[in-house]
Image: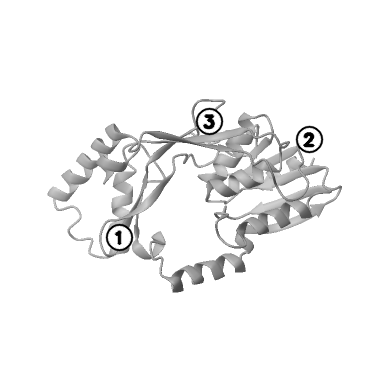
Amino acid sequence: MLRSEYVFPDVADQISALVSRNAESGFYDSKSDPVGLARILTTDIQAVNHDKHLEVVPTIRSRRDTSPEQVERRLKLMREHNFGFKTIEILEPRVGYLEIEALIDTVFDGAGEAAVAAMNKLASATHLIFDMRENAGGETSMVQLLSSYLFSGEPLHLNSFRYRKEDFIKQFWTLPFVPGERKPETPVFVLINKATFSGAEAFAYNLQAMGRATIVGETSAGGANPGDFLPLTEKLDIFIPVARAMNPITNTNWEGVGVIPDIECAPSEAMQIAID
């Protein structure tokens, strides 16, 4: 699967060789527990190029179960957590603060509406703070929607994904319409830390590259390339990045290096620095 799907073919060959050597030596034979085997395989497949998206997980964690019952359970959980929008408030003096735990795909009923409600609640703010500390990422559709509120109506190119297997490029642009008021002139701050990952990094990186936000905190985790879960066995799945993120301004991404803050500070100090 790595050799056929992974975005970096040469790295896939190196990882495959490492896992094959360990398998032939009997290294994995004693790991009968799926959780333990997933953990040691993840360590090995990340060892070559430290890609934090590469991961072997017990099937229950991969969300591959798409039965109506399981989908409804997940949707119920997302609703209980307001689709990732943890805190939405106006701080004095008129600073809009939005703490986001996860970036849920807007295809889910209620996810886009939650984002719209959050942004409209902050419409009177003179400054905006997006708190992406501890945000492990999510879907590009939510990054696209939130970013669209920060620019005028003319669509702007945010990012692209180049898919290895199909050899095509998918572009992501700001949306020509959003419900409510846009805030293209409002100063924006994005708080990040070392746990900020994937889609949350994309949000910060795109805005930073476009000169639209000041990034505050510590360097993020460094996972840029999108992928999907694929079945390995009945009990194990693997997440493999299948495309490479490409920013239209920098012509690169944050893979392995993270998003570098404009104002570097301890994560615990980031909020106050942004407010000041």
Would residue 188 be found to the left or right of residue 157 on screen? right
Q: Amino acid at mark 1?
A: Leu
Disc 1, SS: strand
The percent coordinates of residue 180 (x first, y second) are: 76, 50
Comes first in the chain, label 2 or label 1? 2
Between 90 and 28, the one nearer to me in the picture:
90
- In the image, residue 163 sits, relative to residue 145, either above or below, namely above
Residue 2, label in figure: none
Based on the displayed image, in which of its 4 quarters is residue 163 positioned?
top left
Q: Amino acid at mark 3?
A: Asn
Identify residue for label 1: 236
Quadrant where the C terminus is found in the figure: top right
Comes first in the chain, label 3 or label 2? 2
Q: Write the residue at 56% across / 48% down.
A: 141
Identify residue for label 2: 185
Q: Write the residue at 67% across / 29% down.
A: 211
Q: CA distance from mark 1 to mark 3?
A: 33 Å
Disc 3, SS: loop
The percent coordinates of residue 255 (x first, y second) are: 46, 35
Identify residue for label 3: 247
- In the image, residue 99 sits, relative to residue 254, either above or below, namely below
Pointer 3 with pointer 2, Cβ within 8 A: no
The percent coordinates of residue 188 (x first, y second) are: 73, 39
Q: Residues within 10 Å of mark 1 (few under 14, many from 20)?
A: many
Q: Amino acid at mark 2?
A: Glu
Q: Write the residue at 50% across / 25% down.
A: 251
Would residue 127 be found to the left or right of residue 242 on screen? right
Between 152 and 90, the one nearer to me in the picture:
152
The percent coordinates of residue 110 (x first, y second) are: 62, 62
Based on the displayed image, in which of its 4 quarters is residue 167 positioned?
top left
Q: CA distance from mark 3 to mark 2?
A: 22 Å
Disc 2, SS: loop
